[in-house]
Amino acid sequence: LNEGDACDPASDTATCADGLVCLDDGTGNGDDVCSPPPVGDACENPIQLSGTGGTETGDDANGFNDDIDLDADGCTHFSSGGPDVFYAITIPAGETLSATLQPTGFDAALYIIDACPFSSAGQCVAGADIGFSGEPENVTFANATGDDLPVFLVADGFLSGGPYTLTWAVQ
């Protein structure tokens, strides 16, 4: 199916063409259409964060893919098979990034990777997945490199996703 065509995310036959995903059309009537992936769906096209802190709201259940699936050996010590959203931020030398992910109705995971594309668990420099459904996850990472350090903050989930609030600060 091409961009703008009606699709069904539960169907094996009504799939979108390469590079497109099946998203809610935004009209509130429950219809889905083939669209380009949303910003943040991949580390190559992250949501940019700047400044010393802020709050972002999102819902990774609509159009976001599971690009990273950490396993029990990863930095969260649990599987992260849900859809993930990528945020890019640069941590100044000597500063610390702290972030909290507050999910609504799903078991969230939050972690920081230091390279894109993601290819190994060794790229995960901090992670948290200790809460259960609806409980917040917190990560902190200090930049001790002596240089400004670009990283990716990843909002993920155990098996699924949903609405969330991400708060972050660099100090």
Image: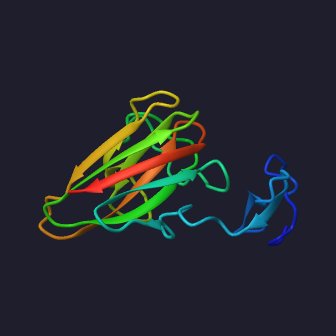
Q: Is residue 105 left or right of residue 75?
A: right
Image coordinates of residue 125 in percent, x first then y, are: 29, 51
Residue situated in front as seen by the camera: 146 or 102? 102
Image coordinates of residue 131 in percent, x first then y, are: 42, 29
Tell me where residue 82 sits by quadrant.
top right
Q: Is residue 88 left or right of residue 42?
A: left
Q: Colour scheme of this structure image?
A: rainbow
For the question of whether residue 100 can be seen, the reply is yes
For the question of whether residue 75 can be seen, the reply is no
Q: Residue furthest top?
A: 132
Q: Quadrant of the N terminus?
A: bottom right
Vertical arrangement, residue 7 with respect to residue 158, above or below: below
Image coordinates of residue 166 in percent, x first then y, are: 44, 49
At 47% from the left and 59% from the top, the residue drawn is 86
At 43% from the left and 59% from the top, the residue drawn is 118
Image coordinates of residue 59 in percent, x first then y, are: 59, 50
Q: Quadrant of the C terminus?
A: bottom left
At 35% from the left and 56% from the top, the residue drawn is 113
Number of callouts: 0
At 44% from the left and 65% from the top, the residue drawn is 117
Residue situated in front as seen by the camera: 27 or 117? 27
Vertical arrangement, residue 62 with respect to residue 88, above or below: above
